[in-house]
Amino acid sequence: MEFLKLTEDQKVLLDSTRRYLDRRIKPLRQEYNNRAIPKPLAHEVLGELSELGFIGGTLPQELGGGSLSYLTEGLLYEQLAKVFSGLAGIAFIQGSVAKTIALEGTEQQRRAYLKGLMKGELIGCVAITEPDVGSNPSDVKATATRGSDGWVISGEKSWISNGDISDLCIVVAKRSTGEGLSRFILERADGYTSSDIDKMAMNEWPTSIMHFDRIPIPAWRQLGTEGKGLKATLKGFEIARAYVALLALGIAEASLEAAIEYSKQRRQWGKPIGQHQLVQQMLADMAIMTDAARLLTLRGLMLIDEGVRCDTQTSMAKAYATEAAVKVASIAVQIHGAYGISKEYPVERLFREARILPIPDGTTQIQKLIIGRNLTGFRAF
């Protein structure tokens, strides 16, 4: 981070965050190795992270936030992702729900949910993707039908982050009459059900199938303007892509550090393998890709802070950082040799985690189509 001139407040915040991560989160990383974090523990840790500036850090103080810039909050997430990327994912989704309700919700909705989300007492998720709807959210099939005193929500969602530990869910649904998508806040007590999907990695971070079987909700739980849910969803992706890039950046940094440390300790032909030219070349490639990912990601966060449209830049960050993390983690495995594919060392886990991230919040190919569209003015999709 030498290229950033940090303020004293940022330095103090990052220092206290690193001490907390060393003391509290690193042991959890070892204990919950690719297995679900229990819901009570998730509540507890989210509350602790919130006090450090995660979750609602960018919200104004009058809404319970820390009035942090997206850049500052991003630096926090970079540190968390480096230590425990799955937990960083849980926290990011929690923050997304809290910020959406804080900034777009009614006063009644903020009173009902915001404090609980900020304290980790409630865990939230956002349900957009469906079994047949991924890259094109306008094709959502879940429906919202007007009832006698509210709405009735029906449908199935899949690959929903935080779904299985959620207490409430922002559901994107199509109105049964009329055009456009709308968003609705559902509570677990309303009757939605979920089941987790077993993944190749990051099973600490639940990714779930969710069922909504004609669930009635009161009218006051419609979120935002009716029929304008697609625009809000696409705007949310702009920010989400920068945060997925942060997760990838943390994994790349952890992979690079592990490879450097191993190259200093492992000896072959009478010297540390870090003295061999080809190993140094691999480490240099890893460092270049990691720094490039950081620069693109932090630029995206800076542009979000400026309030300008930056879907091109956040798509660049997401596409590059996630693919770079896969390459960096793969080289780390190669440097470790046979030990790289054993569970004795962390790099095999980092590689599996990295391989997930080019997919969510728009695949690498979708990011490139967004970039190409914005460069040419031509839509390829």
Image (spheres, rainbow, N blue to C red):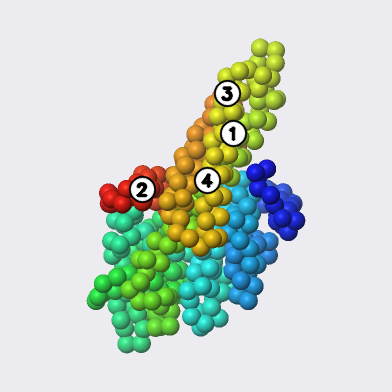
SS category of the residue bearing label 3: helix
SS category of the residue bearing label 1: helix
Residue assigned mark 2? 375
When the figure is inspected, residue 267 is found, relative to residue 160, above or below; the finding is above
SS category of the residue bearing label 2: helix
- Residue name at image x 63 percent, y 63 percent: 68
Q: Are marks 1 and 3 in contact (CB under 8 Å)?
A: no
When the figure is inspected, residue 203 is found, relative to residue 144, above or below; the finding is above
Left or right for 204, reference 24: left
Q: Where is residue 97 shown, x and y percent of the image?
A: 50, 67
Q: Counting residues from the N terminus, which is met first, the one under dot 2 or under dot 4?
A: 4
Decide: few, some or many residues near mark 3? Use Cα within 10 Å; few <14, some 14-19, many ≥20.
few
Q: Counting residues from the N terminus, which is met first, the one under dot 2 or under dot 3?
A: 3
Decide: few, some or many residues near mark 1? Use Cα within 10 Å; few <14, some 14-19, many ≥20.
some
Left or right for 289, reference 207: right
Residue assigned mark 4? 296
**Residue type of the residue flagged with mark 1:** Ala
Kindly tell me whether residue 318 is visible in this rendering: no
Q: Give the mark toward the camera: 4 or 3.
A: 4
**Residue type of the residue flagged with mark 4:** Leu
**Residue type of the residue flagged with mark 3:** Gln
Q: Counting residues from the N terminus, which is met first, the one under dot 1 or under dot 3?
A: 3
Instruction: Judge by depth and name the residue closer to the eye, 22 or 310.
Output: 310
Residue assigned mark 1? 287
Q: Give the mark toward the camera: 2 or 3.
A: 2
